[in-house]
Image (cartoon, grey):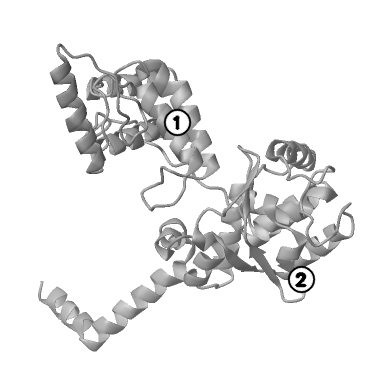
Amino acid sequence: MPAGASGIKVRRSFPTEAAASAWRRDTLAAAARGRRVLPADVTIRELADELVAGMCDGAIRNRSGEPYKPSVVASYTGSLERHVLPALGARRIGDVTRRDVQALVERLARAGSDPSTIRNALMPLRVLYRRALNGGDVDASPVAGIELPAVRGRRERYATAEEAHRLIAATPEQDRALWALAFYAGLRSGEIAALRWRDVDLAAGEAHVREAWCHKTKHAIAPKSPAAVRIVPIARALREALAAHHAIVDDPRDDALIVATRAGRPFDPSTVYGRADRAWTASGLQRITLHEARHTFASLMAAAGVPIEDLSEFMGHTSINVTVKRYRHLYPEARRNAARALDALLDRADTGGRISQLEGRA
């Protein structure tokens, strides 16, 4: 009853002791060569349990070789328990077909699940079968080639500079620094929740992002990527908001969280949104999310003429390509410069004059 590299104990029945011994010898030899050995009757649920356990203890990593973040593990676990395992958990790994997975997708769609929810539901199943493929346990993944509903990107909301000021001013005094960090520094919700007074230098005008808080798992985590560990400039409006907040907080020590509950814990987004929604409704202002406030920071920086390379660094993007894809439309001057450059090239070649002559002959 050997255990493969997966840690799953392999049990099989054989007609003779010689056959059992031969199988055991071949199985152990394969395991010694580093090949993961799974029994033919291992189920999706067993492999899902192995996957989640490996993600939690760091034994199983993502394609970049990094440990899975707690928020990702929580998301995968939820998708498995809610969607995948009820439909496929009892099935053997080699028996699940593309038709089975497609049926799951269509069942979720009929139930009214959002397209992005359906796509996310298949993510842990993709990882599970990718590992099975790499281990030689299956010849093909039933998740490959699945037809998924299109995800329609909703239009992102950007506040103007004047609107951002009004939105912040309308919120309760205790929350203004939080919203200012989103609007004027572009910090993610988890980054704001983990920011401490020692991380900001008002005199130098810098905020150091060193860690984040996972609202799902309630644990401190590393920032989203190595690029997310960064220094963000503090504009005057943010400096004033932080200074005002420092004067009213219960715990202004350097190691205290800037935005915290009365118990000194990271803020709860639903509570913050509840207070903001009530304040904005009373003031006749349109609701905005912290993520949209982060987008607003990008739009304000672009409008101020900040180069997109610098914006990419301040946003904590892994690559400038991410910034260009998401915010290139905020730089209309680049298009105007491109048109002027092409005009200059054509003028030097006297192309414009020749086109006029051709039009005259026509």
Q: Left or right? Give the position of 238 relative to 53.
A: right
Q: Left or right? Give the position of 164 relative to 78.
A: right
- Residue most extreme to the bottom: 348
The picture places residue 170, in percent across and down from the top left corner, at: 79, 48
Q: Left or right? Give the position of 167 relative to 225.
A: right
Quadrant of the rendered structure where residue 120 is? Answer: top left
Determine which residue is flagged by label 1.
Answer: 117
Q: Residue at image x 41%, y 46%?
A: 61
The type of residue carrying mark 1 is: Thr
Q: Is residue 290 above or below residue 161?
A: above
Disc 2 is placed on an element classified as loop
Determine crowd level at label 2: few under 14, some 14-19, many 20+ residues with C-alpha closer than 10 A. some
Decide if residue 47 is in sight here.
yes
The picture places residue 24, in percent across and down from the top left corner, at: 21, 27
Query: Which quarter of the image is occupied by the N terminus?
Result: top left
Check residue 202 in the rendering and tell me which mark sits there, or answer none. 2
In this orientation, which residue lies closer to the viewer: 276 or 91?
A: 91
Disc 1 or 2, which lies upstream in sequence?
Answer: 1
In this orientation, which residue lies closer to the viewer: 72 or 303?
A: 72
The picture places residue 105, in percent across and down from the top left corner, at: 34, 24
